Amino acid sequence: MQEKEGKGQMTNSFIVHGGKKLKGTVQIDGAKNSAVALIPAAILAESQVSIDGLPDISDVHTLYRIIEELGGTVQEDKHTAVIDPSHLVAMPLPNGNVKKLRASYYLMGAMLGRFKKAVIGLPGGCYLGPRPIDQHIKGFVALGAEVTNEQGAIYLRAEKLTGARIYLDVVSVGATINIMLAAVKAEGKTVIENAAKEPEIIDVATLLNNMGANIKGAGTDTIRINGVEKLHGCKHTIIPDRIEAGTFMTLAAACGDGVTIQNIIPEHLEGITAKLHEMGVPIEFGEDSVYIGQAKNLKKVDIKTYSYPGFPTDLQQPLTALMMHAEGSSVITDTIYPDRFKHIAELERMGGRFKLDGRSAVITGPVSLKGASVKASDLRAGAALVIAALTAESETEITGIEHIERGYTNIIEKLSNIGADIEKVTTADVAAQ
Ligand code: EPU
C-alpha cells in the first residue's frame, strides 16, 4: 500500500488501471451475512463456541469488540474465532460500535434470548433507503417481550419468553434469524411462517442446533423451534460467501480470460449462474468451484431481484457494471431495495448509459468506459465500481472504500493475484490541511 503522509484527515482510496485481462484462481471466504449472525448467536451458549472460516472484514472485527465490551473473550486467528461467552453481562449498548453495522440488530435477539433484556442502539450499515425492523419487533413481542424505542435505542425486556406462532408480513432474513435467536431458549414451541429461506439462515440454525437447540425447517418457509433450557459451546465451519462468489463471477465475465473461483456451493449460485448464462458467459462448475471463460459479445438480459432462491439484491449493483458491456437495453429491477441505485450516477461519470425508472434501471450498451474519480456509497455499489474500473480505459480513483472493506476480504490481494492493476492509497485530505 502506498502512503502519503500529511496533516489533517486521511482519505483511503483504490486506484485502478483498467483494461487488463484477468486470469487465475480466486479463493472465496466465509459468508459475511452468516458471520454477522453466527458471532451474536454464540452469546446464547454457556461455554466456548469456535467458528472457523470467518471472513477477515471490518464488520466481523467490530462484533468481536462488542462481545468483549459485554465481558466475553474472543481468541481470534485470521479466520477462526473462539468466543467464550460464559462471563457475559447484559450491558446496555446504546451507542458506539453497534452503530457501525446493520447486523448489530442480531444482538437484540441473542441478548433477549440469553438475559431476557437488552438495550441496543439502532443499527447503522449501508444506506439502501428505509430499512425497517418492524418484523423483528413483531416477533420479539409475540414471544413476550416489551419493546420500546427510547432516544434512538431499542429497549427489550421480558419476564419470560414463551413460544408463539409468528407470521412474517415481509420475507426478511434479519427478522427470521433474530426470532430464531430469541426463541431457541423460550418455553415451548415457536413457529415462524413465511420465513426467509437464505442459506445463511440454515447456517445459523446449524450452529444453534450444534449448541443444543431444536430447530427444524430452516431453509423452508416454515421454521419450527422447540425451546431448550441451556445451550452449550461447539465447533462450527461457516458457509462460503455466495455474494462474494457472485461478484467474482460477474467480474470474471466482465474482464476475465479464464478465472476459477474456489470454495463455493454451486446450488447457492443458481440465480447469478442463470443470468450470466443468458448473457452468453461460458461457465463450468466443479464440485466446489466454478470456471468462468472469456465472455464475448455479451447479450442483454432482464433481471428482477427477489428473496432466495430468487436473484439476490446484493448482486444487482455488481451486475449493472457487466450489463453496460452487453448489446442492447437491459433492465434490472430491485424489488427488495428500490433505492439501491446510488452507483448509477457514478457509473454514468465513467461513460455508462442509464435511465432510472422507479425501482428499475435501464442500461444501454455496449459502452467504452473511461476512468474517473468515483465514490462508493455502499458495499455493493463499491463492488460495481471496482468491476467498472477494471473494464475502463485509464485510471479510476474509488473513494468510500471503507464500505467495500466491510464486506470483501483482501480484495486488493485477490484481484492482484489474477492480474488486476489495483492498489490502495492513503492521501492527506487537502481540505483538512
Ligand atoms: N423489511 C421490512 N421489515 C422488517 C425487515 C425487513 O419491511 O422488519 C423489508 C426490507 O425493507 C426489505 C425486505 O424486507 O425490503 C428484505 O429485508 P431483509 O430483512 O431480508 O434484509 P436484512 O436482513 O436487513 C440482509 C442482508 C443484506 C441483504 C438483505 C436481502 C445481512 C446482515 N444483510 O439484510 O445484505 O441485502 O438481507 O437479501 O444479512 C449486503 O450484504 O450488501 C446486504 C445489504
Image (tube, rainbow, N blue to C red):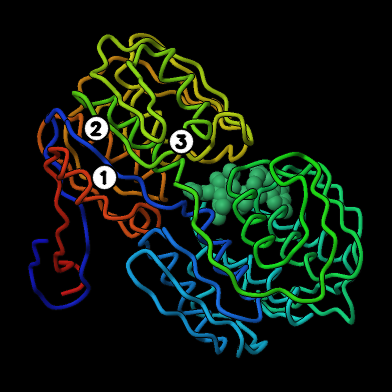
- Residue 129 in sight from this viewpoint: no
Q: CA distance from mark 3 to mark 1?
A: 19 Å
Question: In this figure, which residue is indicated by the disc labeled 3?
Answer: 315
Q: Position of residue 248 (x, y in %)?
A: 33, 36
- Kindly identify the amino acid type of the residue bearing the numbered disc 3: Leu
Marks 1 and 2: CB-CB under 8 Å? yes
Task: Give the structural element (helix, strand or loop) at label 1.
Answer: strand
Question: In this figure, which residue is indicated by the disc labeled 2?
Answer: 350
Quarter of the image where the N terminus is located: bottom left
Asked whether mark 1 and ligand 1 are closer than 8 Å, the reply comes as: no
> Mark 3: few, some, or many residues within 10 Å (few <14, many ≥20)?
many
Does residue 236 sit above or below 217 in this rendering? below
Q: Position of residue 9 (x, y in %)?
A: 22, 73
Q: Image quarter for residue 229?
A: bottom right
Q: Position of residue 37 (x, y in %)?
A: 58, 61
* Residue closest to the eye, 150 or 55: 55
> Mark 1: few, some, or many residues within 10 Å (few <14, many ≥20)?
many
Q: Nearer the viewer, mark 2 or mark 3?
A: 3
The residue positioned 18% from the left and 47% from the top of the image is 397
